[in-house]
Amino acid sequence: MKTSLPRLVRNHRPTTFLRILTHSPRWSSSLSQRPGAAGVTFPGAVNSKFTSALTFEHPSTYPAIPTYRCTSPDGHLIDSTILPCPDALALAMYENMISVSIMDLIMFDAQRQGRLSFYMTSQGEEGTCVGSASALEKGDVVFSQYREAGVFVQRGYKLSDFMAQLFANRRDGGKGRNMPVHYGSKELNIHTISSPLATQIPQAAGAAYALKMQRLQNPDLPPRVVACYFGEGAASEGDFHAALNIAATRSCPVIFICRNNGYAISTPTLEQYRGDGIASRGTGYGIDTIRVDGNDIFAVREATLKARELALKDGGRPVLIEAMSYRISHHSTSDDSFAYRARVEVEDWKRRDNPITRLRKYLENKALWDDEREAEARTRIRRDVLKAFGDAEKELKPPLRAMFEDVYEEMTPEIRAQMGELREILDTYPAEYDVGEFEGGKDSLEK
Ligand SMILES: Cc1ncc(C[n+]2csc(CCOP(=O)(O)OP(=O)(O)O)c2C)c(N)n1
């Protein structure tokens, strides 16, 4: 007996669980073409109208997506629709931004002195990171690239945590295995940074899907989103495409936050893409998208608050924020950016507008800040950074055994054998290897 498709559908009674899961509506109830219709109902693009004009769409016929800003360069709020940020939070965000910038200066110099192997600063992008992180809830899950120290500070990562990772000492949660700046924190729900660009973007989409499933199974759980940070250079990776498309089609509650700072090492954006930045791609994937002024911490905060709301609406969906800024620093301590850009360009951006001076002007306008407080805060933070630096530099390295652990959850017999071999080498040539700076010396290794 033949059964028509609608009947099958009608007879199928999905459980509540399944019904919510497949909540994304079909384009329309019927995909057949009505005679004489002005619109097309090809299943691939149902809202398209027929046209007899042979025209190619060209990006230049569309205006560039505007950049949302709610604070003027002299620190006055210009969007009357937003609720003013509580003073205590504005002050905390300001201190967090200067903490990042002071730590950056000290650690950059320390690398130049050879006291740590590598460093990357986030000068000019403190506002994007601190502002967006201030709009997230504690339980929200974060994935980042490497220039997001502000996110870590805003979520409660301590100076001692930064230093333990940078000096790869035994207090480092990552057991000293990663290059400097590859921070991570399970307690703060921030996934550990890894070097391969953009790999975290599809992982973030997957994590957001998992959060959505957890809440479907247990609606009493608090709503959570994933925030995923990456640069405009990383957005050229295939992983960016995979992530945004799967997040859109699976309706995942994830906020993609692109830091567009104008450069990917020596590559300027003109060689990175020819469209209207990264934001214009969001709408192509069917994703709610906004471009914001990354030098305006309140604009970033407001956009992220709103994005979080959207991401949790109707069971979940992705949102894209493109935060515009300028990479004031060299790409890393391995880069001299004056080899490919003019010094004057950098100086101009440093002085003309940056997230720290803009928030400072706002605080001064409200009589919450002045030169005296600035001097006190800078002296205090500098002292705290140097203290954490000194403590971390003196601390022992993790036990040598940590090199062999966590490759798999359990050590395999082969890995155990390699650990034994290392122990034998150290026993045979004690004068060749100084293992005194590693916790427990060679005794952490089993024969
Ligand atoms: C898959 C991959 N390709 C290349 C690199 C080398 N690399 C490291 S950072 C970087 C530039 C990234 O630029 P962007 O994403 O714009 O971030 P920004 O450094 O400007 O913050 C490149 C090419 C890498 N780490 N991973």
Image (cartoon, rainbow, N blue to C red):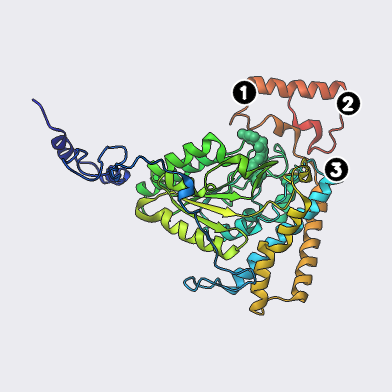
Going from N to C along the chain, the mark reached first, 1 or 3, is 3
Q: Which residue is drawn at 70% across and 75% down?
A: 369
User: What whole-number distance in Å separates the C-alpha atoms at marks 1 and 3?
Assistant: 36 Å
Q: Residue at label 1?
A: 412
Q: Residue at label 3?
A: 114
- Observer-nearest of 118 and 338: 338
Q: Residue at label 2?
A: 430
Q: Which residue is drawn at 46% across and 45% down?
A: 208
Question: Which numbered dot is residue 52?
Answer: none
Amino acid type, mark 3 = Gly
Amino acid type, mark 1 = Thr
The location of residue 82, given as percent across then percent down, is 49, 70
Amino acid type, mark 2 = Pro
User: What whole-number distance in Å separates the C-alpha atoms at marks 2 and 3?
Assistant: 27 Å
Q: What element carries label 1?
A: loop
Going from N to C along the chain, the mark reached first, 2 or 3, is 3
The location of residue 333, given as percent across then percent down, is 78, 44
The location of residue 120, given as percent across then percent down, is 72, 46
Apparent side of residue 139 relative to residue 444 in the rendered image (left or right): left
| Residue that sits furthest to the bottom in the current view | 367
Q: Residue at x 70, y 45 (%)?
A: 181
Q: What element carries label 3?
A: loop
The location of residue 164, given as percent across then percent down, is 74, 47
